[in-house]
Amino acid sequence: MINPGANVQAEEIETDFDSEMENEKEMKKTSAFEADMDEDLSEAALAQMAGSLLMEGEEDDTNLDEIENILELPDTGYPKFTLAKNKARFLRMVSWYRGKEEWIEVAPLSGVTKLFKQQTKELEGIRSSKLDYEMELETGTLTPSQRSYRRDELKMCRVQEKMAVHLISKLQVKIKSGRR
């Protein structure tokens, strides 16, 4: 005789496994992006810029909506993060995006087009994560620690979105000027 509860349990295991596989894929994408950024940022530069980032208990008064290009800010004008991992991620991102902006000037059109497609796809993921964090913060069911973490992650998404949009617009200009 077949146990009716066995199918439910098997479906739950499959769902958990699928969920874990999706999380693993997302972690690999993030790790690949961060590894690429790691290559571009020296430890000395990281240490030099870290002093301008948020220390425990400080408030960040940076209004991201007023900033046109984060990459043009002085080190003291950078957005501040409470999580050490976000401080480091931010500095690696700044370095990576700066490198790509310089690269655009000399890059072949095929490379620019490829990067444009990658960044456009990545921007979708950034915006999706941003919406998730915004919705979680609106629920009001988070502990203070969870709220702090989500706010920091939300700020990271906003910063990354601004940098990606700026890079995409530069890529579009290069693509249009290269096709004339």
Image (tube, rainbow, N blue to C red):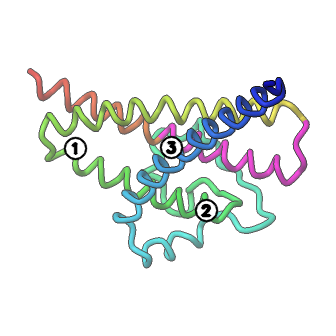
- Residue 122's image quarter? top left
Q: Is residue 110 magenta?
A: no
The image shows residue 32 at horizontal and vertical percentages of 41, 53
Residue at the spot x=48%, y=38% of the render?
68
Q: Is residue 129 above or below residue 143?
A: above
Q: Residue at x 15, y 44 (%)?
A: 107
Residue 158 locus on image (x, y percent): 59, 39
First in sequence, mark 1 or 3: give its number.
3
Q: Residue furthest front?
A: 1
Measured Cα–Cα span from mark 2 to mark 3: 20 Å
Q: Main secondary structure of the magenta part?
A: helix
Q: CA distance from mark 1 to mark 2?
A: 28 Å
Instruction: Give the residue number, with chain letter if any, for mark 1.
Output: 104
Please state which amino acid type lies under the numbered disc 2. Lys
Residue to which mark 2 is pinned: 85
Picture layout, residue 52 above or below residue 127: below
The magenta-colored residue range is 141-162
Q: Residue 160, which numbered label?
A: none
Identify which amino acid the numbered label 3 is placed on: Lys
Choose mark 1 or mark 2, whichever is in front.
2
- Mark 2 or 3 closer to N-term? 3
Residue depicted at 59% across the width and 67% down the height: 52
